[in-house]
Image: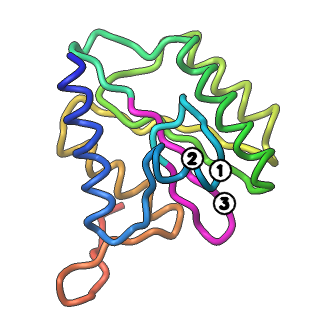
Amino acid sequence: MQQLKYYKSMEFYFFIKNSGIPIMSQQEYSCLYGVHPYIDYIIKTKTSILTFKMALKTSAIDYINEIETQKFIDATLKLSQSSGLKCNGYFIGNVKLSDKAYELLKKTKQQYIDKISMSFCCDYDHNKLNQKIIKMLYSNQLYFYDIDGDCIMIDS
């Protein structure tokens, strides 16, 4: 299972990196922002930081639990406070949130509206997941370009 998680995580990283978007792994961002072990990747934009937590499970019936969610929220909030920037946190993966984790995300959105925003970008279907990731990046003004330098458009 660890190998699958690592492979899928690196697939996400290179999917973003190869599109020209400056994503950083834990090793790359730790010297700039400190160590945040519950954040797998970050992208710094002009006005915010996007944080990513890979949520990869072996079965479609697995869920992201409340403890995992709280750790990711806490790490994202700490990064926001230390950087002075709003952080937008995203779970990326192939599973769903548990009911308690969903309630925690909802509560966090209301409680820390000026510091962090938390969202969920997951789908068990790999192609649908990639489309959701692209839409999430576009919503943060991060775009994919083709070989000729033209912006790749997406369907709404």
Q: Is mark 1 on a helix, strand or loop?
A: helix
Which residue does the numbered mark 2 point to in the structure image? 30
Other residues around mark 1 within 10 Å, as few (<14) / some (14–19) / many (≥20): few
Q: Residue at x 29, y 68 (%)?
A: 19
Does the magenta segment cover residue 50?
yes
The three-letter code of the residue at mark 2 reads Ser
Total labels: the figure holds: 3
Camera-near label (3 vs 2) is 2
Q: In this view, does 5 lie above or below 13?
A: above
> Residue 41, how many percent across, how many down?
46, 45
- Left or right: where 86 falls relative to 17: right
Q: Give the range drawn in magenta.
A: 42-54
Q: In this view, does 112 lie above or below 13?
A: above
Quarter holding the C terminus is bottom left
Q: What secondary structure characterizes most of the magenta part?
A: strand
Which residue does the numbered mark 3 point to in the structure image? 48
Does the magenta segment cover residue 143?
no
Q: Which residue is drawn at 48% across and 43% down?
A: 26
Q: In which quarter of the image is residue 96?
A: top left
The three-letter code of the residue at mark 3 reads Ser
- Left or right: where 33 falls relative to 140: right
Q: Closer to the N terminus: mark 3 or mark 1?
A: 1
